[in-house]
Image: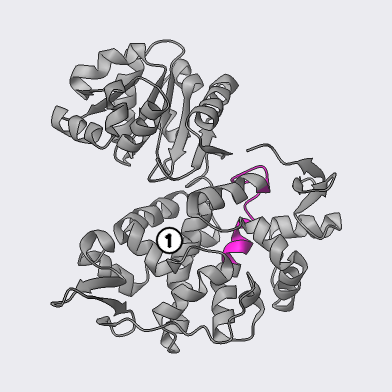
Amino acid sequence: MGSGIAAISAAAGCKVLMLDLTIEAARQGAELIDAEHRDRVDVATFDDGMERLSSFDWIVEVIVEDLDIKRQLFERVEAARADGSIVTSNTSGIPLRDLAQGMGDRFAADVAITHFFNPPQLMKLFELVPGDDTSPEVIEKLADFAGTKLGKGVVYAKDTPNFIGNRVGCYFMLSALHKAKPFLDEGMTQETIDAVLSHPVGLPPTGVYGLIDLIGLDVMDLVGKNLAANLPAGDPGLACASFPEVEQRMLARGQLGRKSGGGFAKVNKLADGSREKETFDLTTEQWRPAVEPDLEGVPGDLGEVLFTETDQGRLAWDVFGGGLRYAADLVPEISDDIVNIDRAMRWGFNWALGPFELLDAIGPDRVIDKIRAEGGELPTMLQVLVNAGASSFYGAVDGVEGARYLGLDGGWHEVPED
């Protein structure tokens, strides 16, 4: 991640200094940067290079996700940096208030969270999180630089657990591990679950198990622990922050995903040079040959599977429908508006549409009717939509579709430019 941030900054024409524990580690990181931009990058150790920070405008921390270690580093940075420089953390979930506590007024005014998504050379999302005392000028400078120089899509998040993208996306993944179990017990295959929770609902083809294999079960475990420690009481995410028992056993024996040679799936190279894909069956806890998913009766239209009276439809409604309802209940907690949530999920998780854009595509009234038929309570933004007498979350202005959005106040607002 650090090398990726350095790479895009160097490509934007910036002078970059990379600090690491050892000079060998710093040099290895620099070698990952394209050769045509590497002449803009210098390297040093934390011990030898700290005093050089006084000549840099933006100091980005990209170290291990440990609060105490980060704070120790920030104390050294604060002593070395110049007035007017900006300090940010690339943490994916540690609250800024904890990072800045007791660090002094100058630090509090100049610090923010700038959360890149990995790999930063490819992923558009840039979550920008201010603290209570962060100067508005700092946020303006970071947003302008990230958007115009680095080519990122800036999303304004709040200092809440896992911010926007990971709060919504990781709830979807972790809840899926739990909610899929009854369907597995009834005989549905993991291949079918991944296939239903991909293109039919506007998600990437990896599905759930494939995406977690890509991320790593160990990383998802850390995310879950962070959520368990920081989510507010009563949040639905608390019920699924810990893995089901089978996934806990996988984690314990190092069956983490692609990084370990296999997690929920693996690919074996055969003697004749061909490849064979296997699936780790969560009901038998044994490897078996991969099978074709059962998508018979799954509509081709985006999101229609949520309303089908089939096992696949029940799965989609329980898991992905649950994710939509969760997102619709997080305004204004994680964001003041729906636009930032939609952009975060498209730019950070490659959803075809953000949660509220998808609700518009399938018809919010259908979702409302289904929730009410089940005796459920409408989440915040669906209730706002009902109270406003609106039929969608986005509307047209002068013939331009999606130019305005429904706010928490029930009024219409102009969609800010990307």
- Name which residue lies at 23% across and 24% down: 43
Question: Is residue 329 on the magenta stretch?
Answer: yes
Q: Residue shown at 47%/31% (left/top)?
A: 150
Q: Is residue 268 magenta?
A: no
Query: Which span of residues is magenta-colored?
Result: 322-338
Give me the residue at 70% from left, 63% from top: 361
Give the image location of residue 49, x and y in percent.
Answer: 23, 18
Mark 1 crowd level (few <14, some 14–19, many ≥20, 10 Å Cα):
many
The residue where tag 1 is placed is: 241
Quadrant for the N terminus in the image: top left
- The amino acid pointed to by label 1 is Ala
Residue 317 location (% of width, % of height): 60, 74
Depicted 333 relative to depicted 290: above or below = above
Q: Residue at x 29, y 20 (%)?
A: 76
Q: Is there any visible trace of residue 406 in the rendered image?
A: no
Q: Nearer the viewer, residue 398 or 80?
A: 398
Colour scheme = one colour
Q: Nearer the viewer, residue 180 or 194?
A: 194
The image quarter containing residue 38 is top left
- Classify 115 as above or below 241: above
Q: Quadrant of residue 236?
A: bottom right
Q: Is residue 202 visible?
A: yes
The answer to which image quadrant residue 23 occupies is top left
Q: Residue 357 at x, y = what percent?
A: 67, 57
Q: Is residue 63 left or right of residue 209?
A: left
Horizontally, residue 89 falls left or right of residue 318, namely left
Q: Considering only vertical position in the picture, is 245 above or below 28?
A: below
Give the quadrant of the C terminus: top right
